Image (spheres, rainbow, N blue to C red):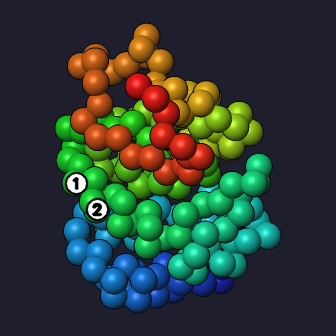
Amino acid sequence: MLSGENKDKFAEARQRMLRHDLKGRDITDPRVLKVMAEVPRQDFIPESFQSQAYADGPLPIGMGQTISQPYIVALMTQELRVNRDCEVLEIGTGSGYQTAVLSQLVKKVYTIERFNQLSESAQAVLGRLGIDNVEFYIGDGSCGWPEERLPPSGCFDRIMITAAVPNMPSL
Protein backbone atom coordinates (compact mmCIF):
# COMPACT_ATOMS: atom_id res chain seq x y z
CA MET A 1 0.00 0.00 0.00
CA LEU A 2 1.30 3.44 -0.89
CA SER A 3 1.63 6.19 1.67
CA GLY A 4 -0.09 9.51 0.98
CA GLU A 5 3.29 11.07 0.16
CA ASN A 6 4.10 8.40 -2.44
CA LYS A 7 0.63 8.66 -3.99
CA ASP A 8 1.16 12.41 -4.37
CA LYS A 9 4.57 11.83 -6.00
CA PHE A 10 3.01 9.46 -8.50
CA ALA A 11 0.12 11.86 -9.15
CA GLU A 12 2.52 14.72 -9.85
CA ALA A 13 4.70 12.52 -12.08
CA ARG A 14 1.62 11.28 -13.96
CA GLN A 15 0.45 14.86 -14.59
CA ARG A 16 3.93 15.82 -15.80
CA MET A 17 3.86 12.81 -18.15
CA LEU A 18 0.47 13.89 -19.52
CA ARG A 19 1.52 17.51 -20.11
CA HIS A 20 5.01 16.96 -21.46
CA ASP A 21 5.28 13.46 -22.91
CA LEU A 22 1.76 12.96 -24.23
CA LYS A 23 -0.05 16.25 -24.93
CA GLY A 24 3.30 17.82 -25.79
CA ARG A 25 3.82 15.16 -28.47
CA ASP A 26 0.48 15.06 -30.30
CA ILE A 27 -1.54 12.69 -28.17
CA THR A 28 -4.88 14.44 -28.65
CA ASP A 29 -7.57 11.79 -28.13
CA PRO A 30 -9.28 12.87 -24.89
CA ARG A 31 -10.30 9.27 -24.10
CA VAL A 32 -6.69 8.08 -24.34
CA LEU A 33 -5.45 10.98 -22.22
CA LYS A 34 -8.10 10.27 -19.57
CA VAL A 35 -7.16 6.59 -19.35
CA MET A 36 -3.42 7.36 -19.26
CA ALA A 37 -4.16 9.72 -16.34
CA GLU A 38 -6.06 6.99 -14.48
CA VAL A 39 -4.16 3.72 -14.99
CA PRO A 40 -1.42 3.44 -12.32
CA ARG A 41 1.67 2.50 -14.36
CA GLN A 42 3.68 1.98 -11.16
CA ASP A 43 1.52 -1.07 -10.39
CA PHE A 44 2.83 -2.82 -13.52
CA ILE A 45 6.56 -2.56 -12.86
CA PRO A 46 8.92 -4.05 -10.27
CA GLU A 47 9.14 -2.09 -7.04
CA SER A 48 12.80 -1.27 -7.67
CA PHE A 49 11.80 0.77 -10.76
CA GLN A 50 8.60 2.37 -9.46
CA SER A 51 10.28 5.73 -8.90
CA GLN A 52 10.71 5.87 -12.70
CA ALA A 53 7.13 4.82 -13.47
CA TYR A 54 6.22 8.03 -15.32
CA ALA A 55 9.54 8.71 -17.01
CA ASP A 56 9.15 8.46 -20.77
CA GLY A 57 11.15 5.33 -21.32
CA PRO A 58 10.80 1.56 -21.23
CA LEU A 59 11.56 -0.28 -17.99
CA PRO A 60 12.49 -3.92 -17.33
CA ILE A 61 9.69 -6.20 -16.14
CA GLY A 62 11.55 -9.51 -16.02
CA MET A 63 12.12 -12.39 -18.42
CA GLY A 64 14.24 -10.05 -20.59
CA GLN A 65 11.11 -8.00 -21.41
CA THR A 66 10.20 -4.34 -20.91
CA ILE A 67 7.13 -2.22 -20.33
CA SER A 68 6.80 0.27 -23.20
CA GLN A 69 7.32 3.96 -22.59
CA PRO A 70 4.09 5.85 -21.83
CA TYR A 71 4.22 7.82 -25.09
CA ILE A 72 4.32 4.62 -27.18
CA VAL A 73 1.42 3.11 -25.19
CA ALA A 74 -0.64 6.26 -25.75
CA LEU A 75 0.35 6.59 -29.42
CA MET A 76 -0.43 2.97 -30.26
CA THR A 77 -3.75 3.22 -28.43
CA GLN A 78 -4.67 6.47 -30.18
CA GLU A 79 -3.73 5.10 -33.61
CA LEU A 80 -5.79 1.94 -33.03
CA ARG A 81 -8.92 4.14 -33.05
CA VAL A 82 -11.00 1.91 -30.80
CA ASN A 83 -14.48 2.36 -29.41
CA ARG A 84 -16.58 0.69 -26.70
CA ASP A 85 -17.85 -1.94 -29.16
CA CYS A 86 -14.40 -3.19 -30.19
CA GLU A 87 -12.95 -6.57 -29.33
CA VAL A 88 -9.18 -6.28 -29.52
CA LEU A 89 -6.45 -8.90 -29.80
CA GLU A 90 -3.23 -7.84 -28.09
CA ILE A 91 -0.14 -9.90 -28.95
CA GLY A 92 2.32 -9.56 -26.09
CA THR A 93 0.67 -9.00 -22.69
CA GLY A 94 3.95 -8.23 -20.94
CA SER A 95 3.26 -6.36 -17.72
CA GLY A 96 -0.41 -5.84 -18.61
CA TYR A 97 -0.15 -2.02 -18.71
CA GLN A 98 -1.17 -1.70 -22.36
CA THR A 99 -3.88 -4.30 -21.68
CA ALA A 100 -5.24 -2.18 -18.83
CA VAL A 101 -5.25 0.96 -20.97
CA LEU A 102 -7.10 -0.80 -23.79
CA SER A 103 -9.56 -2.44 -21.40
CA GLN A 104 -10.90 0.96 -20.37
CA LEU A 105 -11.70 1.88 -23.96
CA VAL A 106 -13.09 -1.31 -25.51
CA LYS A 107 -15.64 -4.05 -24.96
CA LYS A 108 -13.04 -6.79 -24.45
CA VAL A 109 -9.31 -7.41 -24.77
CA TYR A 110 -7.96 -10.83 -25.73
CA THR A 111 -4.28 -10.92 -24.82
CA ILE A 112 -1.63 -13.51 -25.49
CA GLU A 113 1.74 -13.81 -23.74
CA ARG A 114 4.43 -16.43 -24.22
CA PHE A 115 5.86 -16.15 -20.69
CA ASN A 116 3.63 -17.72 -18.05
CA GLN A 117 5.24 -15.65 -15.27
CA LEU A 118 4.45 -12.36 -17.02
CA SER A 119 0.88 -13.40 -17.82
CA GLU A 120 0.22 -14.44 -14.22
CA SER A 121 1.65 -11.16 -12.92
CA ALA A 122 -0.45 -9.14 -15.36
CA GLN A 123 -3.57 -11.11 -14.39
CA ALA A 124 -2.91 -10.40 -10.71
CA VAL A 125 -2.48 -6.65 -11.25
CA LEU A 126 -5.54 -6.34 -13.47
CA GLY A 127 -7.51 -8.35 -10.92
CA ARG A 128 -6.45 -5.99 -8.10
CA LEU A 129 -7.56 -3.05 -10.26
CA GLY A 130 -10.96 -4.67 -10.84
CA ILE A 131 -10.46 -5.02 -14.60
CA ASP A 132 -12.54 -7.96 -15.77
CA ASN A 133 -13.03 -7.53 -19.53
CA VAL A 134 -9.78 -9.28 -20.45
CA GLU A 135 -9.22 -12.86 -21.58
CA PHE A 136 -5.68 -14.17 -21.17
CA TYR A 137 -3.91 -16.89 -23.12
CA ILE A 138 -0.38 -18.20 -22.69
CA GLY A 139 1.24 -19.13 -25.97
CA ASP A 140 3.19 -17.99 -28.99
CA GLY A 141 1.51 -14.86 -30.33
CA SER A 142 2.95 -15.43 -33.80
CA CYS A 143 0.63 -18.44 -34.03
CA GLY A 144 -2.41 -16.25 -33.39
CA TRP A 145 -5.31 -16.69 -30.99
CA PRO A 146 -6.67 -20.24 -30.61
CA GLU A 147 -9.63 -20.71 -32.94
CA GLU A 148 -11.72 -22.41 -30.25
CA ARG A 149 -11.41 -19.29 -28.05
CA LEU A 150 -12.35 -16.65 -30.65
CA PRO A 151 -14.95 -14.01 -29.73
CA PRO A 152 -18.58 -14.85 -30.58
CA SER A 153 -18.25 -12.80 -33.79
CA GLY A 154 -15.40 -15.09 -34.88
CA CYS A 155 -12.96 -12.24 -35.44
CA PHE A 156 -11.31 -9.23 -33.83
CA ASP A 157 -12.12 -5.60 -34.58
CA ARG A 158 -8.50 -4.55 -34.01
CA ILE A 159 -5.14 -6.26 -33.45
CA MET A 160 -2.25 -4.66 -31.57
CA ILE A 161 1.21 -6.19 -31.56
CA THR A 162 3.12 -5.05 -28.50
CA ALA A 163 5.86 -7.67 -28.73
CA ALA A 164 8.97 -7.80 -30.86
CA VAL A 165 9.02 -10.53 -33.47
CA PRO A 166 12.18 -11.81 -35.13
CA ASN A 167 10.38 -12.23 -38.48
CA MET A 168 6.93 -12.20 -39.98
CA PRO A 169 5.11 -15.51 -39.53
CA SER A 170 4.04 -17.26 -42.70
CA LEU A 171 0.32 -17.51 -43.39
Q: Which residue is drawn at 20% across and 38% down?
A: 85
Task: Kindly indicate the quadrant of the structure image that contains residue 3.
Answer: bottom right
Residue 56 locus on image (x, y percent): 53, 79
On-image quarter of the C terminus: top left
SS at mark 2? helix
Residue 37 can be seen in this image = yes
Q: Which residue is drawn at 42% across and 14% down?
A: 147
- Residue receiving disc 2: 78
Q: Nearer the viewer, residue 135 or 154?
A: 154
Q: Is 110 situated left or right of 23 in this image?
A: right
Looking at the image, is 84 positioned above or below residue 23? above
Q: Local crowd at mark 1 within 10 Å, few (<14), some, or many (≥20)?
A: few
Residue 25 locus on image (x, y percent): 33, 83
Q: Residue at x 71, y 63 (%)?
A: 60
Q: Which mark is residue 81?
A: 1
Q: Which residue is drawn at 35% across and 66% down?
A: 75
Residue 99 locus on image (x, y percent): 47, 48
